[in-house]
Image (spheres, rainbow, N blue to C red):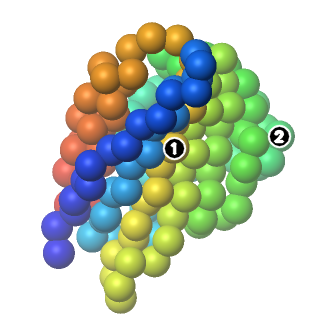
Amino acid sequence: MTGSIEQGTSQTHGNTHILHFLVRLPRPMETVWPVLATADGLAGWFTAAEVLQPRLGGAVALRGLGSGHVTAWDVERVAEYTVEGGRVRFHLERDGDDGTALRFTHEFQGEGEGESEARWRARFERLVETLG
């Protein structure tokens, strides 16, 4: 099984943009989780996490997005980081016997909706390669 990135969807409410992606990964949740919930894992496909305290309320600083806090944390299932640049949420679900479905949300303010969708698609392509 290879990974796949399903079409991203976007919504705009005033100045708030919300992107959603469904990414199917060919690895079990236990393998995917560290790639989304550790500084080393995030740096491998997304961005440097200069600070990441892996717990609800922990501090987080993501290069390019800003600093903030961990606003949802359910080990091996949900990691959500709310930072100056918005909110990113990774929600994992089992997908078949050995796969994982990643339901991703990025909520942010301002312009650049299309550009942001393209950037996330490129990041998820790197994630699929990393886990391939």
Q: Residue at x 42, y 37 (%)?
A: 10
Q: Are there few (<14), some (14-19), or many (20+) residues within 10 Å of tag 2?
A: some
Q: Quadrant of residue 3?
A: bottom left
Q: Quick one: 37 or 19, which is closer to the camera?
A: 19
Q: Residue furthest right?
A: 57
Q: Pointer 1: what residue? A: 105
Q: Residue furthest front?
A: 14
Q: Residue at x 48, y 16 (%)?
A: 64
Q: Quick one: 8 or 32, which is closer to the camera?
A: 8
- Determine if residue 50 is in view: no
Q: Quick one: 14 or 4, which is closer to the camera?
A: 14
Q: Closer to us: mark 1 or mark 2?
A: 1
Determine the secondary structure under disc 2. loop
Determine the secondary structure under disc 1. strand
Q: Is residue 60 left or right of residue 20?
A: right
Q: Are there few (<14), some (14-19), or many (20+) residues within 10 Å of tag 1?
A: many
Task: Give the answer, above or below, for where 71 lies relative to 75.
Answer: above
Q: Pointer 2: what residue? A: 57
Q: CA distance from mark 1 to mark 2?
A: 19 Å
Q: Is residue 27 left or right of residue 53?
A: left
Query: Where does residue 78 sit, x and y in percent of width and height?
Result: 62, 58
Q: Residue at x 72, y 39 (%)?
A: 70
Q: Is residue 74 left or right of residue 114?
A: right
Q: Residue at x 66, y 24 (%)?
A: 83
Quarter of the figure that contains the N terminus? bottom left
Query: Where does residue 63 sit, x and y in percent of width and height?
Result: 50, 19
Q: Amino acid at mark 1?
A: Thr
Which labelled disc corresponds to residue 94?
none
User: Which tag, 1 or 2, sits closer to the chain's start?
Assistant: 2
Q: Amino acid at mark 2?
A: Gly
